[in-house]
Image: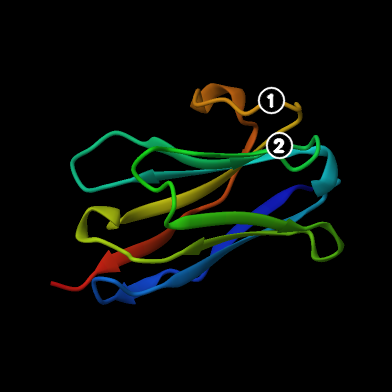
Amino acid sequence: QVQVVESGGGLVQPGGSLRLSCAASGLPLDAYTIEWFRQAPGKKREGVSCISSVDDYTYYADSVKGRFTLSRDNAKRTVYLQMSSLRSEDTAVYYCATRNDQDCSDSEGDYTYWGQGTRVTGAS
């Protein structure tokens, strides 16, 4: 049985940092492309960052480029999203999704397994 579990969300001050984790079991993580999506209140879900199963190619949305870093530890079956210089507009529920393909995609339908999400809230 495949399980994808996100953790690491919380309340953060503007300019602060958080590290989100996505732990996957029941699948060979190194063979999967992983993308983080987020959904802010009142907005549709959007792709944030993706790491490919080939050469760990990483992609970042323009809104987070230079502030977020995505990495994977295949031995721990975990993908990490390091978020720095957080802004109020980063407030959202963050979801981790897996895709058995080497290419990243912003289409939610291309991802098979999803976690339940972890909430990141920027303090005002």
Residue 27 visible in image: no
Q: Residue at x 55, y 56 (%)?
A: 69
Q: How many marks?
A: 2
SS under mark 2: loop
SS under mark 1: loop
The residue carrying mark 1 is: 103
Q: Residue at x 34, y 66 (%)?
A: 85
Residue 97 position, x and y percent, is: 59, 41
Contact (Cβ within 8 Å) of mark 2 with mark 1: yes
Does 83 sit left or right of 34 as displayed?
left
Q: Residues within 10 Å of mark 1 (few under 14, many from 20)?
A: some
Inspect the image, locate mark 2, and give the three-letter code of the amino acid beneath it: Ser
Comparing 109 with 84, the one in front is 84
The residue carrying mark 2 is: 52
Q: Residue at x 36, y 36 (%)?
A: 45
* Relative to 109, residue 96 above or below: below
Residue 28 position, x and y percent, is: 86, 46
Does 76 sit left or right of 35 as displayed?
right
Comparing 77 with 19, the one in front is 19
Inspect the image, locate mark 1, and give the three-letter code of the amino acid beneath it: Asp
Q: Which tag, 2 or 1, sits closer to the chain's start?
A: 2
* Relative to 112, residue 90 above or below: below
| Quarter of the picture holding the C terminus | bottom left
Comparing 57 with 39, the one in front is 57
Residue furthest front in the image: 66
Q: Residues within 10 Å of mark 2 (few under 14, many from 20)?
A: many
